[in-house]
């Protein structure tokens, strides 16, 4: 089995970094990384596995999630109605399932209006900035997509605190990913595409 493992930054995956394709933070960086990756591997049969951190308004920091749905939001900062894209994702029943909102920026009261934030919070469990691009490429190229995330914050920290938490939580997430890889490896040999 061939797996293309993606994360935004090395801090998210700690000791597993040698197996990971890094996208950088945000949609623009992720799009560039995916164009380069797909130019090289588009004809390969592989599973895209996205791992990393997410913010959540109500889930405890350190919770591991299996993303079951991705809602792609725009970068509009106005209170106008948006028509987000929805993507279904394969979810692991052994881990808590989550609906993820993927945005162009950190989801926080400094960026979005409180009214808009409350509307989004009522529909999703967690937030990131890369998943909507990754799932779009997976679907466009006919690849299976799986995503495991760990809650790093409750939409209440700045980038430096986030970075430190992500470093501290990376080994917890990677222990889970290694368990998944071990279970898959019992069935067939795993090759990481990088």
Image (cartoon, rainbow, N blue to C red):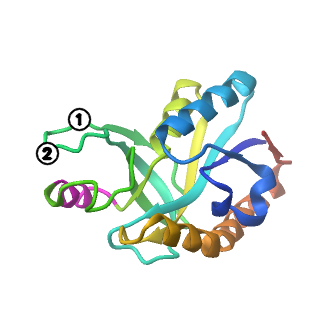
Residue 182 falls in image quadrant: bottom right
Residue 179 falls in image quadrant: bottom right
* Image position, residue 110 (x, y; %): 27, 60
Name which residue lies at 83% across and 58% down: 186
Name which residue lies at 78% across and 39% down: 193
Secondary structure at numbered mark 1? loop
Instruction: Identify the image quadrant of the C terminus.
Output: top right
Q: Is residue 181 left or right of residue 173?
A: right
The question of residue 71 being in magenta is answered with no
* Image position, residue 132 (x, y; %): 45, 40
The question of residue 119 being in magenta is answered with yes
Instruction: Identify the image quadrant of the N terminus.
Output: top right
Query: Could you tell me if residue 64 is visible in this image?
Result: no
* Image position, residue 98 (x, y; %): 42, 60
* Image position, residue 55 (x, y; %): 42, 64
User: What residue is pinned by disc 2?
Assistant: 79
User: What residue is pinned by disc 1?
Assistant: 83
Q: Which residues make up the magenta segment?
A: 116-124
Q: Residue furthest right?
A: 189
Q: Is residue 96 left or right of residue 143?
A: left
Tell me which secondary structure the magenta stretch mostly adopts. Answer: helix
């Amino acid at each position: 089995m061939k797996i293309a493992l993606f994360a935004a930054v090395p801090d998210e995956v700690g000791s597993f970094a040698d197996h990971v394709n890094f996208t950088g933070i945000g949609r623009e960086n992720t799009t560039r990384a995916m164009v380069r990756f797909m130019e090289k591997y588009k004809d390969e049969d592989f599973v895209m596995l996205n791992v990393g951190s997410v913010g959540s308004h109500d889930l405890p920091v350190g919770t591991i999630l299996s993303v079951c749905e991705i809602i792609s939001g725009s970068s509009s900062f106005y209170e106008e109605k948006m028509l987000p894209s929805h993507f279904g994702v394969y979810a692991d029943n052994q881990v808590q399932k989550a609906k993820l909102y993927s945005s162009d920026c950190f989801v926080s009261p400094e960026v979005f209006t409180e009214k808009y934030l409350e509307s989004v919070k009522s529909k999703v469990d967690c937030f990131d900035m890369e998943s909507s691009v990754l799932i779009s490429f997976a679907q466009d190229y006919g690849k299976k997509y799986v995503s495991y995330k760990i809650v790093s914050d409750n939409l209440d920290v700045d980038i430096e605190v986030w970075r430190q938490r992500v470093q501290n939580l990376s080994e917890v997430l990677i222990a889970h990913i290694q368990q998944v890889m071990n279970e898959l490896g019992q069935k067939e040999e795993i090759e990481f595409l990088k």
